[in-house]
Image (cartoon, helix red, strand yellow):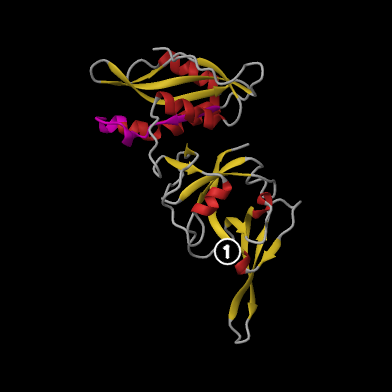
Amino acid sequence: MPAQVISMGDFRTAQHHAAWSLLEIARPGNRTQPLGVLLADAQTDQLTLRLLPAAGLDELEEQAADILDFLAEDLAQKALEMGASQLLASLEDSLSGFFRISDRTEIAYSGDPQRKTDKLFDEYVDGAVRPYITHIPVYQLRAAATKFGEGMNTGGGEAEDWVRVPAGMRVSDGMFAVWVVGRSMEPLIKDGDLCAFRANVTGSRQGKRLLIEKFDETDFASRYTVKRYTSVKDVGDDDDWGHREVRLEPLNPEFEAFNLAPDQFRVVGEFVGVLESA
C-alpha cells in the first residue's frame, strides 16, 4: 500500500528534499508487517535508514532472521555503490516475496536526515518509547545538572522529550541528552548539537570528554561546558601525589584550556556521542 504523504516543511524553504519508502515483510495470512524506513536525499543521493532488529519480530524462521541481521548493512553498502535513489528503484522492481516496499513519498525537511527518518519510523513502524532501551531523556542543561552529577541519583524529574538512540549505541540507565552550545569542541561537537551523555562517571577520568558544571560562574551560558579532562598532579608535603587541579581542554585550537581546583566544579556526565547534528 502506498505510504501516506507527510508534510515535513515547506518545499520552498526547507533545506533538503528527499523521498522515503516503507519497507515491509510478508507475514502469515496474506498480511504485511512494517520493518523500516528508507530515506533517499535528493541533493546528496545518500541513504538514511532505520530498521527493526530481527529480535523485535515474532515467528521468524532462522534463515529469515539471519537475513534481517545483515539487511541494514547490506542496504547501506548498496546505496554507496549505486546511490540511494537507484537503490529504491531497484527494490521497487525486484521485491515481491518476503520483502515488500511502498511507493516513494516526497518530503521536504530541515535538519538531520537520521532524525527525520527516526520520526517516520516512530510513526509508521514502531513508535513505542522504551526508556533506556531504545530512547533516552532530553533535558535542559540546568535540569540535567540538577538531576545528574556527583551525589545525584537518576530517579525522578520530568524529561522535556525522549530521543531514539542510534543503532549500535549501547544504552544504559543514567544516560541523557542535552543541546550543547558553543564551538570549543569542534569538530567532534558542533554548536547546537544534541549529544548523549552518561551520568555517574566512574573510574579514571583522564582523557574523557566530560560535561562540567563550574560553581564559580553565575552566567548560565558559561556555567556548563564540555571539555577534555586532564588531571594536573602536584607533589604534596608528604611526597605523595595529589590531585591539586584539573585541566579542561577544548578540541578547537581557537579556544584556550584552563585549570580548576577540585572544589570548583563537578562532573555531570561523560560524552557518548552526537544524536542530532546542527
Q: Quadrant of residue 263?
A: bottom right
Q: Which residues are magenta?
A: 47-64
Q: Position of residue 48 (x, y in %)?
A: 52, 29
**Membership of 55 in magenta stretch:** yes
The residue nearer to you, when weighing 8 against 18, is 8
Instruction: Residue at 37% x, 21% y: name it.
Output: 24
Q: Is residue 108 above or below residue 53?
A: above
Q: Position of residue 120 (x, y in %)?
A: 47, 25
**Hey, what amino acid is under mark 1?**
Gln
Instruction: Residue at 70% x, 46% y: name it.
Output: 183
The image quadrant where one finds the N terminus is: top left
Q: Is residue 206 left or right of residue 65?
A: right
Q: Position of residue 154 (x, y in %)?
A: 44, 53
Q: Is residue 271 visible?
A: no
Identify the element where label 1 is drawn: loop
Q: Is residue 119 left or right of residue 67?
A: right
The residue pinned by badge 1 equals: 206
Residue placed farthest to the right in the image?
Answer: 254
